[in-house]
Image: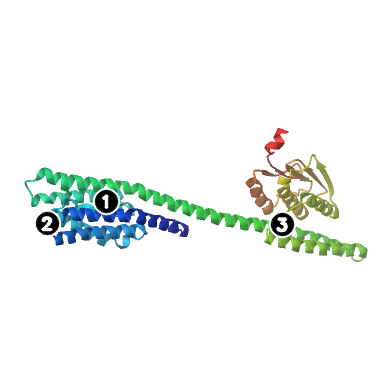
Amino acid sequence: MTSGHAQRTQGRLGRLNLVKYLPLHTAVGILLVVIDAETWWHAAVLGLGVAAALVAFSWWAMGGLFRVALPCLAVTAVVWLLGVLVVGGGTAFFGIALVGPLIVPRLPRHRGVAAVGLTVFVAAVGATRLLVAPGDVPEVLLNYVLIPASVTAVVTGLMFPNKGFYDMVTELEESREREAELAVIRERVRFASDLHDIQGHTLHVVKLKVALAQKLVDSDIDRVKRELREVHALVSDTITQTKELAYAQRRLNLSAELENAKNLFEAAGIRVRVDRETEVDPSAGELLGQVLRETTTNILRHAEACEVRITLSRSGITIVNDGVRAEPPPRLGGLAALRERVAGEGGELTVEQRDGRFLTAAEFPRRRSDAAL
């Protein structure tokens, strides 16, 4: 089924064909009628074939050929037969030599057989001229068999690449439409992933702080108040970030995410060690911040860590924790989505579990300007 974009493109090509070739076909058809017609009814018969050919060409150009294909083909076939046997006009094949090649390449199957059959039919009808002019064998073979059949075969052969061109245009337009749909889907997945980053992270932190407040409610009311204020501030910040995400204004700050991760780990009783080898490339900072946020959430949710080590390089981050559980690791859907996003930016996200430690590392290729330093 042809897509809307492909239909519009074919419509534009069809209108272009009408403007370019319909006047030419009309002029050629009228000229041939004038050359061959000796009486008014000869002109009427030959003109009918030209008219049928022009109708078929117009409908072909506009993409509706098969609505008129059979009537036009029948009319031009009869006109060719009358032209051979009655009118004596060797150019009466004009109609069928135009209509037939328009139809054959668009058949669903057996196009080669149909092309041969059309050529043979034109030649066979032309040969019937020998029934009324048995003494003019060379002229009949040349003007009624060889020339009409050759022209029909050549025009039919030329229409096959034309059909291939239209098919290629259709495929390209459908490919563009699929690419546009995939772009929309990718954007929706990106939005869902960002929303998960924001709200999933916040909910787990709120859960942690509320649990802490419940433990301290009878022993340290001031700490409980502070934790609740932080929960309120965190929820307010999440609302702001969600609005920014909805309006495509959200940008993660790696330094802020690093500070937030340290505070969360310390609040959960997890030791944190941060090593900065150098300043982080700003172009990689946002995605590295997303990796850090997602990893922080996963450690708080799934690990039983006592220590977390975060290492920052020019274009990468490595987070290692010692909280690997005995059972198989959970499926971390957030990191799986991030791996695709990191790969889309030319980077690589590595997730490994070994020797009682869980490692998450993201690395982007160094820019040429960096490599030259």
Secondary element at image label 2:
helix
Report the residue at 33% width, 57% height from top: 60
Question: In what element is the residue under mark 3?
Answer: loop
Q: Which mark is residue 114?
A: 1
Report the amino acid beneath label 2.
Answer: Val
Q: Is residue 2 visible?
A: no
Tag 2 or tag 3, which sits nearer the N-term? 2
Residue 121 lies, in percent from the top left, at 20, 51
Mark 1 vs 2, N-terminal side: 2
Q: How is the image coloured?
A: rainbow
Residue 222: quadrant of the picture:
bottom right
* Type of amino acid under label 1: Ala
The residue sitting at 71% across, 50% down in the picture is: 329
How far is disc 1 from disc 2 in space, using C-alphas?
27 Å
Residue 14: x and y in percent read: 38, 56
* Residue type, label 3: Arg
Q: Which residue is mark 2?
A: 86
**Residue 309 image offset from top left, x and y in percent:** 80, 44
Q: Which residue is mark 3?
A: 250
Nearer the viewer's eye, disc 3 or disc 1?
Answer: 3
Label 2: how many Cα within 10 Å (few below 14, some 14–19, many 20+):
few
The answer to whether residue 45 is seen in the rendering is yes
Q: Residue at coordinates 43% horizontally, 53% vertically from top-left? A: 170
Question: Residue 330's spot in the image, x, y percent?
Answer: 70, 52
User: Alpha-carbon distance for marks 3 and 1?
Assistant: 62 Å
